[in-house]
Image (cartoon, rainbow, N blue to C red):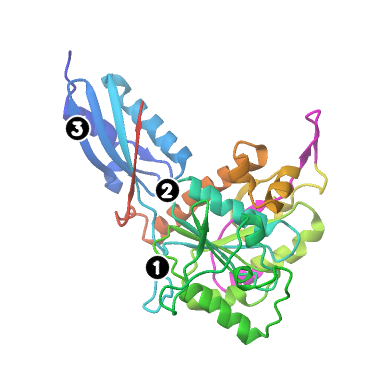
Amino acid sequence: MSSLDESAVRSALEGVQDPVFEKSLAELGTLLDLKVEGDSVRCKVALGSPSETLRDKVRERIDAALAELAPRHVEVDWEVRVPTRETVSDDPIPTVKNVVLVMSGKGGVGKSTVATNLALALRRLGSRVGILDADLYGPSIPTMMGINGHPASKDGKTIVPLQRFGLKMMSVGFLLEDPKQAVIWRGPMLHGALQQFVRDVEWGDLDYLVVDLPPGTGDVALTLAQKMRITGVVVVTTPQEVALADVYKGVSMCQKLSIPILGVVENMSWFTDPSGQRHELFGSGGGEKVAEMAKAPLLGQIPIDPEVRKQGDEGLPIVQAAPSSPAGDALHRIAEKLVDLIAKAHFDRTGGSKAPKAENAKRLRIIR
């Protein structure tokens, strides 16, 4: 049995490029540990995103870098370091690393469906996730998540969020005695409730808090932006022209408030009939046009699938009910792109030289 040279192995691994940060493991300081025993290699690598695709790409680059040395076994321990937004001294949720707003500027585009499934897709990546239903006049998270009941309070001051599928959830719908009851509040009452849902809910340590905003360009986003640093916005649209004018207004609002737009999701992009033929029922190109105006990437397109509606009505979102379906897979890939973009945005904000720190890092191990 021949022994590998540890210095040669280290040199090869340090030259591996991180696809998100576009720098080598040596420059980032993310090759955390290395052990060479005979012809076997074991190393630990830190990543700034929980994306499975990112992990696979880095693994491929590790294997390629070590190919000439021909190790018999390569074992990689992964440490995921989700980066943290900047917080101010009076931030109401300092233990939440990232706050992601999901908005559309227009009703009827499936924004809540995207928000719910996006939160679940992030959870399925192994992240700690919460979802806040900020659509106080039309709460839909209780129905879509198939959960009802009233949140409890341990001390009479803070609210314990309800949970399902590993998600922490808060919605005004949980406070209504009758789900068909109308919420009739003036602006100050609405803003007071919204602030309470942020400040007084025991969100705990979260990697991502997904906020489902109401349709339109009301001042809910403004209220949130004034109270805390927002990581960014995901804009939801549909392909047809009639939806774009209102969505453009939402994009413009974000730009005026200096809220970063992380990306655009096009919902209801096409329908595939039983014969396999694709039909663009609402036209095409809407997502690309919004992304161009927002100067943000098109994160993905979600096909029309009757199961999305059916499972949502039954309280079992498609990402949970059928993750391998075309719609479920599209949402999973959107979540992966989103976490990579968040990591890159944080990296660029810090000058493009420092990888995320090891606070509350999660460790994964894959052996091949």
- The residue singled out by tag 3 in the image is 35
On the image, the x and y values in percent for residue 360 come to: 32, 55
Amino acid on which the number 1 mark rests in the picture: Glu
Front residue of this view, candidates 61 and 94: 94
Q: Residue at x 42, y 41 (%)?
A: 19
Nearest to N terminus: mark 3 or mark 1: 3
- Visible in this render: residue 196? yes
Q: Quadrant of the N terminus?
A: top left
Front residue of this view, candidates 123 and 315: 315
| The stretch drawn in magenta includes residue 255 | yes
- Residue at the farthest top position: 1
Classify residue 171 as left or right of residue 11: right
Element assignment for label 2: loop
- The residue singled out by tag 2 in the image is 49
The span from disc 1 to disc 2 (Cα, nearest Å) is 17 Å
- The residue singled out by tag 1 in the image is 86
Q: Which residues are magenta?
A: 252-279
Nearest to N terminus: mark 1 or mark 2: 2
Classify residue 222 as left or right of residue 156: right
Q: Residue at x 26, y 21 (%)?
A: 69
Nearest to N terminus: mark 3 or mark 2: 3
On the image, the x and y values in percent for residue 349 come to: 41, 61
Task: Determine crowd level at label 3: few under 14, some 14-19, many 20+ residues with C-alpha closer than 10 A.
Answer: some
